[in-house]
Amino acid sequence: MIASIDNDGYIRMDASVLRVLKLLVLTSIFICISGAAIASRLFSVIRFESIIHEFDPWFNFRATKYLVTHSFYKFLNWFDDKTWYPLGRVTGGTLYPGLMVTSAVIHNILKKIGLPIDIRNICVMLAPAFSSLTALATYLFTLEITCTLPSMNNKKTPALLSAAFMSIVPGYISRSVAGSYDNEAIAITLLMVTFFLWIKSVRLGSILYASITAIFYFYMVSAWGGYVFITNMIPLHIFILILMGRFNYKLYTSYCTWYALGTLMSMQIPFVGFLPIKSNDHMAAFGVFGLLQLVVLTNYFKETLSPKRFFNLMIAFGILVFTFGISGLIIATKLGWIAPWTGRFYSLWDTNYAKIHIPIIASVSEHQPTPWSSFYFDLNFLIWLFPIGVYLCFNDLSNESIFIIVYSVLGSYFAGVMVRLMLTLAPVVCVCAAITIGKLFDLYLDFKIILSKKVYELNEKVINKNNNFWNLISRFSVILTFGFYLYFYVNHCIWVNSNAYSSPSVVLASKNRDGSNAIIDDFREAYYWLRMNTNEDANVMAWWDYGYQIGGMADRTTFVDNNTWNNTHIATVGKAMAVSEANSEVIMRRLGVDYVLIIFGGMLGYSGDDINKFLWMVRISEGIWPEDVNERSYFTDRGEYKVDDMATKTMKESLMYKMSFYNFGKLFGGRDVYDRVRQQRMSSDYANNIHLDVLEEVYTSENWLVRIYKLKDQDNFGRDLIEVGENERKDTTRRQKRTLTRNRPEFDIRV
Amino acid sequence: MAGWNIARLVAVLFSLLTLCCAQILNTLVLYDSDEDLTTYSHLIETLHDNRLSTDFHKVGVDEETQIIDINNKILYSNILILPNRAKKLSVNIDHDTLLTYANNGGNLLLISEDLGTQLDTSIFLNQLGIYPSPKGYTFNDFHSEESIDSFKPEFLNKYIIDDNTNNEISTISFANSAVALISNSEYLIPLLRTSRTSSSKNEDDLIWHSGNQGYLSVAFQGLNNGRVLWLGSPASLKNDSLNKKFVNDIIQWTFQLKSVIKATFSTNKRVDSLDPSIELPFVDADDYYKIKDTTYYEIGLSKYEFENDKWVPFTLDDESDHIQLEFIMLDPYYRLNLNHTASTENEAIYSALFKIPDQHGMFTFSVDYKRPGLSYVTVEEVVPIRHLANDEYARSWEIPNSKVYMAGYGVVVAAWLFFVILFIFSGKKNIDSSKKNN
């Protein structure tokens, strides 16, 4: 019998059956959440195809392919001679291998069990697969928190809600759609798992859990540079707990275990190396580790000494530690034992720092400060539930809820500074919002009292119908409102995912005039042209944004790419683009350039083109050669950025400008030439007069999005290519030429 | 079936056609009038003596002479243009044709006279940086004791006019010569300079050159090793004042019969740093140079010997001259003189042994041997140099400095073990005693 009705009229069920039922429901909820997480990330595959997106993923994909075809050690020692020509890149030592290793392991396991799947498909689908794991990890994390909140009656509701929120929150989806094969794809999962395990080990004071935390921390270190977030979050949590006087041996056990193991393990990643004991970013963790030892020592003294002597000792001790600590830190930094803070770190505190000092960081759009609207766009109604959740955590101040508070403060700050750190904020927002809604549902969805009252009604006849009625109304209005919000959230997320975050950016979608969908595939078209029509060892110069794509799709050597480790080299390329043809030729010959690839959106109206990025090239090269490149000279006297007839002389002479608009006039057949991105008109005469002498156009894609030029060989007769071109353009008659041969030339003395 | 046959026929015809076109005739002589052929008959004999076959075409606006085909492929390897003042060399040759011809490896011997230079030739020469004096300028030297028509020349380049000839020639005729000014182009090779007291003027007293800024003969070698030689005066080529040795030398040089060198091969190999004779070959595509490897570079150089029509080892005859190897990544890290270490029947082998610098990257082995008068030899090879792999560093016990740290490590481990043992065995007692006290 599954259920029976007892004498009092209650329905009774067997406990084991109930447990099975509960498990069944829970499982089906998880399957639904996973399904939602994965399905909502597939828009890009359905709309376009199974393709790697954007820029960085192309490098990760290329590295994964290398790992799959070579051995692990070969991968770790990989010296890439196809990038950063002629410097090369010690790739194995300058990447976070976690992502590549993960997909290679999955690939190999699937192959072993008889499911040989193309590595590209694994890479494409890795992010959605991991996002469903993130939902599960969020569930565990939230459950761990709610378990410590005594005022929370139903512990699992917020946990399940947070998992559901997390699975489709746009802030996270933006980095984890199918094809977005980037470090963040697995890093957020690992972040949540690490935090969950950390909370668990703090609660239990268990060495086992602390060790597992360290292992996942290691995995995180191997996967994403953002591991520093954990490295600072956990010590901060401990530090605040100590300040609040909540020190106990559970904290000591879990922190010391985590720190010792985690640091040792993280040092095994070649790219991290000795950073954990050298870089300032890691000093907080080290400091807290030291502090904990002191706290333990004082605890010991407290037990053994008299209060008076203990107090005196403490004062002396405190001053000693403080002075030694600070002076030690300063001296070590001065002597260069500890690396000074990195530029990216400074830009976390001062959003203008990068703009002034490191244009290379500022030039990346995802390093810009977050606009307010994007908080609502990426988090929808969770953003205003978030503070309430934090308030609820304040209400029941447990060690674990303090972690949530610390996380939310840090997360909000960082998300406000950099657009891309929205990613680290999203989980805590989901958790807090889930706690809020869980609490609300706790109160308003609980009909037990009303139902039970009805039972009492019969016996005691104490009726307060009026009161009961309003109670019901308020309950229903709250529930319906939030029901609507939840519905709206799902709607919003799906809409955002499908419209904003599912474009591979390698392939562009647009509409034809009749409204049908059109695919603009210029990038791949051009990269394929390079692959098929140039020498295998040809060197392609392009702005660094396209480095990874050229490497991944065209398989040609590039000069600079998205791993912006060498500012000078990038500035050199920027300078080659920014200066005049004659000066640029010198740079290009020295670098060994064969082809130059640029992106031109003027024909199509694609605003992310090189002319719009041009100022960054100018700024970056100005940082190194202020005497050769000057940003001001690219603006007109009125401070406008003009590309038409009114453009400044420097602008008109710059190689990038010439390459962009060369032959553009021919497209308009004598009419005024119109640049759709800048929305500027240039006269046909002027446009047709833009000429190039040291480069020749070899390829322009269908929609003029990608243009490829070849650097001409040096003139066989030692003439200056620009002079040759100018003489040709003069178009002198034979008679004029004859006169020229009869004029005595003027020379310097021959040496 | 028929269609297939026609297709095959067309294919066969086409291949025949390409065969015909591919054949390069030897030397084209462009002359002005039929008299020329007799005036210059000795010159033409000299051409034949040098195993050059000749083809004669008259210049003129109505003549049709093909020197390049529609694919810009050259149809003659050499062209000799005798002095003429035709409006055009032929219907289909203008200055651009000459440039294309030279660009595709053709050699040109051009001769002017003081009556002026043919316009297309002149424009072509101007492009190279040679500016012959136009019609109307006369070359004079009122201070010299020698006649300007016939004097003892001092040739400036030993690869074109070798020292023997230079010494043997007592006088050479340079009557009615045009004088050229030349630009600073590095590819120009001045051959014969005007005397310090000479000048060339026209009727309006305009000066073309004065002193030794002018040249009576200039050679040029382009980056593709195509050669051009310009002579200001035809006198030394004419039968009545022919200078056999001189003519022979300039023909041989211009038409690439002497001073022609080439690199036959260039290799680099990884060798053992202690014993360079042991080669450490690369086993697969992933095995290549790493930093601080030792490499052995070799290049073979041959010189063409016309007498026996074969390639012989190229040796440097000048002590101060060196063939240099550069090892470049953006900047040269090494610039080494190559040593002549071996010779085979056809080539001389130059080599260098050096240690790759402690810097990874894409390095270029570059030999860039350019001497005025000799063919240019440019050989470049790019090799990747990788960093040390994780297992290629010295292990800790091999580093003397590390002993301190190793000892420290041992002490900590031992101390920890000692402490644990002490803790375990001393701890129990305490608990027991405290229990008893309680």
Image (tube, coloured by chain):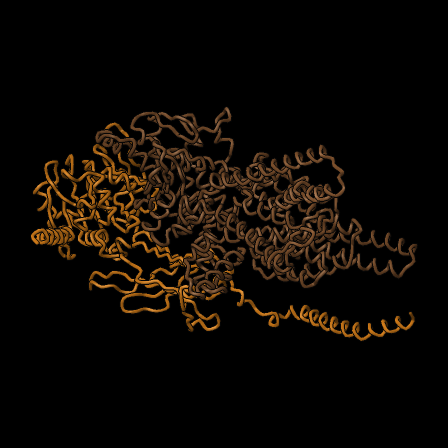
Q: Up-down: is A354 above or below A292?
A: above
For chain B, give the colour: orange
- Position of residue B304 relative to residue B426, above or below, is above
In-front residue for pair A430/A451: A451
Q: How many marks?
A: 0
| Image quadrant assignment for residue A375 | top right
Is A81 placed left or right of B263 in the picture? Answer: right
Question: In this rendering, does residue A279 appear at all?
Answer: no
Residue B420 in view? yes
Q: Nearer the viewer, residue A565 or B30?
A: A565
Q: What shade does chain A have? A: brown
Q: Position of residue A504 (x, y in %)?
A: 44, 44
Q: Residue B65 lies in what quarter of the image?
A: top left
- Image position of A117 (left or right of A740): right
Camera-side residue: A158 or B168?
A: A158
| Quarter of image, res A68 | bottom left
- Front-lying residue, A271 or A146: A146
Q: Position of residue B148 (x, y in %)?
A: 23, 42
Q: Is residue A483 left or right of residue B44?
A: right
Coordinates of residue A194 in the picture (x, y in percent): 63, 55
Q: Position of residue A610 (x, y in %)?
A: 44, 38
Name the image quarter holding the C terminus of chain A: top left
In the rendered image, the quadrant that contains the N terminus of chain A is bottom right
* In this rendering, position of residue A484 left or right of residue B435: left
Identified at 20% across, 36% down, the residue is B119
